[in-house]
Image (cartoon, coloured by chain):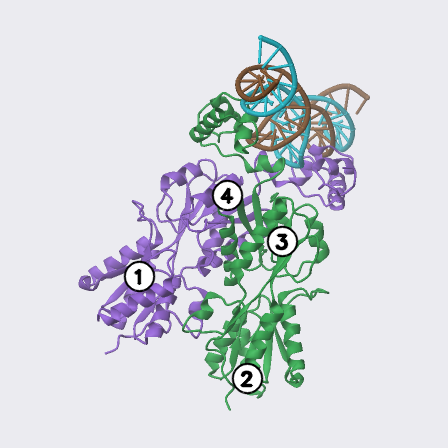
Chain colours: A purple, B green, C cyan, D brown
DNA sequence: GGCAAAACGTAGAGCGATCTACATTCGCTG
DNA sequence: CAGCGAATGTAGATCGCTCTACGTTTTGCC
């Protein structure tokens, strides 16, 4: 007990060492009004000497924890690494800390992860969960500022930052059409049932694909394949394509809803030695690799991640009207898209 | 104030609703001794009804937070995604929560991130930071259980789980030697100065490379290149190789210290159209992609991640003697290694 | 039936910060 | 040099939970 350094120093210890009251130390910490230069100095020295660090828990009990939380559905997806990079970047210089909660294995929906974050008393949450209901999010947003990533529902209880998936998809479709493809298949994720999810990026990409095909008079070529969220993409792609080739139903181009999927398709195409164009979405780093050269859409993940943090900080500092921002994607044309073989 | 649902329910509210004392509710929560079935029932109902969730902060102030922390130096590296996957997997079924702290942008060393985690009052920390000093870690370990990932220093203040980098490297070198390569270059990371870091995975890979070259009588072929940690790997690889080719000093094979590096080298080789074998380390998912087919070493990241969590939980539950475990890696031979051209 | 032991439940003191309300001192001005 | 506002500092309640130390019932057993 009496051994020095036995226990971490508390504000009490600092106050004693500096010969002031706890409240005074607290003021210095928060650089609140009413601290003389001399006191700031003495307290600062004491803090230094005792290696004092304020307890986040104790702080959280009375207000803010200076911690923001972000929920990530799938950290295996490099797109989220970009987002995280932007987020951490936006945080340097502030005294806020970022903690990440991974959506529980086998349950990517995200309720659990967001709840865990709120339980941690974070001052604000960034969520990626496209599948949680709006009502639920709004109930969370009553107590904790929320910024949602990639959702296209414009609630006024929380902010959103999203890519313009419609525009990105149209860029892809036009590119394929211009190359001469009519027979474009869309490969997307098969999510769990959930009514009214027109707000998810994948849903927007799907509906835009459908519209683009119809509007350009290619209705009869519409074909959509779905793969389970946690299925083995590579295995699925291989089986699917082998089958399509065998039955003569292979498309001339495939638009995959995201790059992980597109890479799996590209792998299958390579193995089978067929000539099918592929486009992905997200522009993960590997897409630019010379061995891969995948045509994709750059969603500006890093910028969006940074902006999400900024918006959250604004909320934490008191903004109450919702803000919704959209980022313009860029089509990156590379080697996996060519004109269909004669 | 009086509006119901205005504020989150506290244990007090639950106690009132169930007609028992706060202490009784707390007992139910922790399923401690001395709770009758009837009481458990009533309290459970009250909790349900009020959507009560215990405050992590308040708990942390008096003991444990039921939260574990993991520090990740670079979430862009898919190897860590594997580790995380294993870690989250090992946590399901426990009532512990995992939070991730990213090493601050531009400072991958990890002091800040680990400190942040400790400040959060996590019950235990998993760190990847190979570069923080042992002394510092031991001071952290005085108060918070610590499991370090990939360190080869066997402190008895903290546990370690690491791959057998010596064995992995020897597997690589023997493979290359058997194919007929004498001229093997090692490309590794150029870390900030830090004395005595023979414990890092990369350092072990380097020294094992040197020894393998010497022991096999290839001392005159030893060549080591270093690239800055946050440099653009692809750009570096291209410049370096172009230069080597121009001056006729290109090796016949390159052993890259990890897959991200190996992929960059592979890209450069592809662009320059030269015939050089490449091996990486970590066996990231892309290594197995048909377009890439990179020979690499599977470090069992997922298993190690899971085991690290288990070890940490043991520590949290009271174990005090240190445990150090090593995992045996597997060489995955693929298309990027061939015999040197006659 | 009586009595000890087990079972069940409660009161109340902290944990480490923040923040309001208040006390004291200082610096000026008229 | 009295008097007043600004500047500086402090006391003490409070946040939500855990846990020790005790009371009060029940139960079991001879």
* Residue A132 image point, x, y percent: 38, 44
Give me the disc on residue A117. Answer: 4
Q: Are marks 3 and 2 on the same chain?
A: yes
Helix, strand or loop at label 1? It is strand
Q: Nearer the viewer, residue A206 or B319?
A: B319
Q: Outermost residue toward the bottom?
A: B342
Mark 1 touches mark 2? (CB < 8 Å): no
* Disc sitting over residue A187 in the figure: 1
Q: Residue at x 49, y 42 (%)?
A: A116
Pointers 1 and 4 in contact (CB under 8 A)? Answer: no
Q: Nearer the viewer, residue A129 or A97?
A: A129
Picture residue at 57% right of the left edge, 35% below the top? A63
Would you say residue B137 is visible in this rendering?
yes
**Chain of the residue displaying label 4:** A
Q: Residues within 10 Å of mark 2 (few under 14, many from 20)?
A: many
Q: Which residue is mark 2?
A: B252
Label 1 marks a residue whose chain is A
Q: Secondary structure at mark 3?
A: strand
Q: Position of residue A52 (x, y in %)?
A: 71, 43
From the image, tell me which residue sits under label 3.
B147
In which chain is the residue bearing label 3?
B
Between label 2 and label 4, give the one nearer the viewer: 2
Instruction: State the image coordinates of residue A247 (x, y, percent, origin top left).
Output: 22, 70
Mark 1 or 4, nearer chain start: 4
């Amino acid at each position: 007990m009496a051994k020095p350094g036995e226990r971490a120093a508390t504000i009490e210890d600092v106050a004693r060492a500096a010969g002031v009251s706890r409240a005074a130390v607290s003021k210095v910490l928060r650089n609140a009004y009413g601290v003389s230069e001399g006191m700031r100095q003495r307290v600062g020295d004491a803090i230094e000497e005792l290696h004092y660090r304020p307890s986040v828990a104790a702080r959280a009990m009375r207000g803010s924890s200076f911690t923001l939380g972000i929920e990530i559905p799938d950290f295996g997806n490099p797109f989220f690494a970009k987002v995280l990079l932007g987020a951490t970047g936006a945080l340097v210089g502030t005294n806020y800390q970022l903690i990440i909660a991974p959506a529980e294995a086998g349950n990517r929906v995200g309720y659990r992860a967001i709840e865990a974050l709120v339980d941690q008393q974070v001052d604000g949450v960034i969520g990626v969960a496209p599948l949680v209901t709006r009502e639920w999010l709004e109930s969370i947003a009553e107590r904790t500022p929320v910024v949602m990533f990639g959702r296209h529902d414009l609630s006024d209880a929380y902010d959103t930052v999203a890519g313009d998936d419609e525009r990105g998809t149209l860029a892809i479709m036009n590119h394929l059409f211009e190359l001469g493809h009519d027979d474009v298949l869309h490969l997307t994720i098969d999510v769990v049932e959930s009514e009214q999810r027109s707000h998810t990026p994948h849903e927007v990409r799907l509906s835009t694909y459908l519209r683009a095909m119809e509007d350009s008079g290619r209705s009869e070529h519409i074909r959509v394949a779905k793969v389970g969220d946690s299925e083995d993409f590579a295995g699925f792609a291989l089986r699917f394509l082998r089958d399509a080739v065998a039955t003569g139903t292979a498309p001339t181009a495939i638009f995959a809803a995201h790059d992980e999927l597109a890479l799996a398709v590209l792998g299958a195409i390579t193995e089978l030695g067929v000539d099918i164009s592929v486009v992905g979405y997200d522009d993960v780093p590997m897409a630019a690799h010379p061995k891969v050269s995948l045509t994709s859409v750059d969603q500006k993940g890093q910028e969006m991640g940074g902006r999400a943090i900024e918006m959250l900080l604004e909320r934490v500092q008191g903004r109450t009207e919702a803000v919704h921002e959209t980022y313009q994607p860029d089509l990156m044309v590379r080697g996996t898209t060519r004109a269909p073989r004669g």
